[in-house]
Image (cartoon, helix red, strand yellow):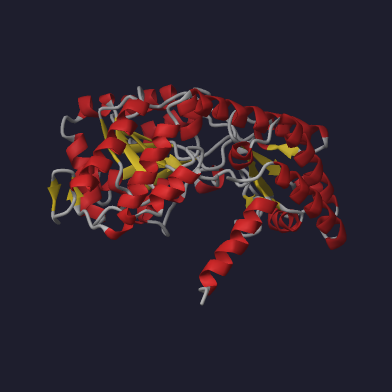
Amino acid sequence: MTDQIFDLIAKEEKRQQETLTLIPSENYAAAAVRQAVGSVLMHKYAEGYPGKRYYQGNRYADEIENLTRERAQKLFGVPHANVQPYSGSPANAAVYFALLEPGDKIMGMALAAGGHLTHGHPAITFSGKYFQSAQYSVDQDGWLDYEAIAKLAQKHRPKLIICGTTAYPRRIDFAKFGQIADQVGAWLLADISHIVGLIIAGVHPSPVDDAHLVTTTTHKTLRGPRGALILVTQKGVQKDAELSQKIDRAVFPGLQGGPHLHTIAGIGVALREAQGKPFQKYGQQVVSNTRVMAEELIKLGFKLVTGGTDNHLLLLDLRPERIEGKSAAVALEKAGIVTNANSIPHDPAPPYRPSGIRLGTPAVTTRGLKEPEMKQIAGWIKQALAASKDDQVLKKISGQVAQLCRKFPLD
């Protein structure tokens, strides 16, 4: 008898095949990555690190983890990489626990401005609950204000500064963040979870020369499984020669037990695929697609935060359209276009009913869509939001979307 779970998986596969994923944090992993993640490695416990496991039978597990770690170190040009974190939040937590004591000051980007919960969001997260948090924001037009950030750092003198975003459509100046951190004697953590693939492709500056530590998830623009990396840079080792050991101890046994070997193998496969010219072309196409979509949406009368984009995502301010972000996201999903409601900088609306939506091109670029299709999608977005309460119009657009998707099938 077929398990109902597999029926649901089949339906989800069909949904993914027939809709356009414009959520910037989602992507499609290659078949080889999925094969590694679904392998017999999920059977094995491997608490500890290569050569220092607590269980027997880890000969090949050691080789897989060492190979994945070496690939990360080579690809990013760093002296040490930890490939065991289960996801991005535990990776950030490991950095905090390695460097800080409860009550120490940290400084990160406010969630409402485009930061992440683990960057010091107050009260409800571990990063805001166990550490004193100062949050920097963006200016009225949505741009990072580095002078204001420097002044805030001078005022609070945090022990750790976090730079990295989840909803910022422009390049991050890691060199300026590095200078700010150096001026106050702080550690600098660069969370590149969203832009890691763009950095590898050379279309976004790398933080490796300016930050002491780098964290990233592995499933967004890297197109791997849902895992994470912690990278220790040469600058980090120069600040503390024992930094790599501190990070490893914070991951295990500090936060985690046995690593997920099947995920580590998938990360290793994704890192290998990211080494070649095809991946560079992919990153370039992501940026090109996003810019074309932004330009077309502006032509269609939409208001974009910062007036455009430099990376893989853009933010639509829907207040001129007189539609809430959540209502817009629901209407677009009915039209076969999957995105998410998102707060805009200095949003007057509450987080559960924000004024914007967030769009991104990593997943559709993986499918092979290019600039002409971006213009077509922008037109559908305009039509869908103009008829957000007309299910017949939305169903018609959904059919057109499905027809386009059939031309660009997932592997």
Which residue of the protein is positioned furthest toward the front in this rendering?
A: 1
Q: Total number of numbered labels?
A: 0
Residue 238 x/y as whole percent = 21, 24
> In this rendering, is residue 348 above or below 210?
below
Instruction: Tell me if residue 226 can be seen.
Output: no
Residue 349 falls in which quadrant of the image? bottom right
Horizontally, residue 304 falls left or right of residue 66, namely right
Horizontally, residue 120 falls left or right of residue 378, namely left
Which residue of the protein is positioned furthest toward the bottom in this rendering?
A: 1
Residue 286 x/y as whole percent = 60, 32
Residue 161 x/y as whole percent = 36, 36
> In this rendering, is residue 287 above or below 111?
above
Horizontally, residue 278 falls left or right of residue 190, namely right
> In this rendering, is residue 99 above or below 11?
above
Q: Residue at x 51, y 77 (%)?
A: 1
Residue 124 x/y as whole percent = 42, 59
Residue 285 falls in which quadrant of the image? top right
Closer-to-camera residue (28/113): 28
Residue 169 falls in which quadrant of the image? top right
Instruction: Tell me if residue 251 can be seen.
Output: yes
Quarter of the rendering occupied by the C terminus: top right
Closer-to-camera residue (55/312): 55
Q: Residue at x 18, y 43 (%)?
A: 50
Q: Residue at x 60, y 60 (%)?
A: 12
